């Protein structure tokens, strides 16, 4: 069984993330969306909120599930029996960072591959950070996130 791990903070999940997840689900028997617990970042949404938003977004993808991960990614992937780390790349700046991470992960564990997926061109500029900023400034994010995520952003910012 081929298991692909798609790690990220997903704060919040965007249509770009979902595009990568949907395409990865056709390449792997199982895809695990690994929500990273990172004490260095202060997320807008809690781990539970992020996991709930992702799960609500995954309808129709029976081979995709979520999990919360902590610690070294290659250790997590190995523990779950994963064969590959899935990463989305939007721009050259993403590639430079992701290329370094892929090489380091390979050095740490040669049996785990990194698979880069390019998003649809309509999502190439999209990031969670940009979505949160647009939402904070009162802009319409309906084209960038599922409707339940748009509602969660509005509710979070209203408090």
Image (spheres, rainbow, N blue to C red):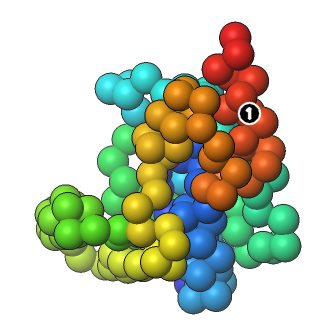
Number of other residues with Cα within 10 Å of mark 1, as a class: few under 14, some 14 to 19, many 20 or more:
some
**Which of 66/96 is in front?**
96
Question: Vertical placement of 25 versus 76: above or below?
Answer: below
**Where does the image place residue 137, in percent across and percent down from the top left?**
53, 28
Question: Vertical placement of 2 versus 66: above or below?
Answer: below
Q: Is residue 93 left or right of residue 21?
A: left
Q: Is residue 25 left or right of residue 72?
A: right
Residue at x 60%, y 30% (from the top left corner): 138
Residue at x 55%, y 27% (from the top left corner): 136
Q: Is residue 83 left or right of residue 67?
A: left
Q: Quadrant of residue 103?
A: bottom left
Which quarter of the rendered picture does the N terminus lie within?
bottom right
Residue at x 36%, y 78% (from the top left corner): 116
Q: Secondary structure at mark 1?
A: helix
Instruction: Please name the residue that numbered disc 1 is placed on.
Output: 152
**Which of 43/157 is in front?**
157
Which quarter of the rendered picture does the C terminus lie within?
top right
**Which of 89/140 is in front?**
140
**Where does the image place residue 154, in percent across and percent down from the top left?**
71, 28
């Amino acid at each position: 069984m081929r298991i692909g791990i798609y790690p990220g903070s997903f704060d919040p999940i965007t249509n770009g993330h979902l595009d990568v997840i949907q395409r990865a689900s056709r390449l792997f028997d199982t895809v695990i969306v690994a929500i990273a617990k990172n004490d260095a970042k202060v997320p807008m949404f809690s781990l539970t909120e992020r996991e709930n938003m992702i799960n609500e977004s995954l309808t129709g993808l029976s081979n995709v599930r979520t999990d919360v991960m902590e610690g070294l990614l290659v250790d997590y992937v190995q523990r779950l029996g994963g064969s590959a780390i899935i990463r989305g790349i939007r721009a050259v700046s993403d590639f430079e960072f992701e290329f370094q991470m892929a090489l380091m992960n390979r050095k740490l564990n040669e049996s785990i591959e990194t698979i880069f997926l390019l998003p649809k061109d309509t999502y190439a500029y999209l990031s969670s950070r940009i979505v949160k900023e647009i939402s904070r400034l009162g802009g319409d994010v309906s084209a960038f996130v599922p409707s339940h995520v748009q509602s969660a952003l509005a509710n979070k910012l209203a408090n």
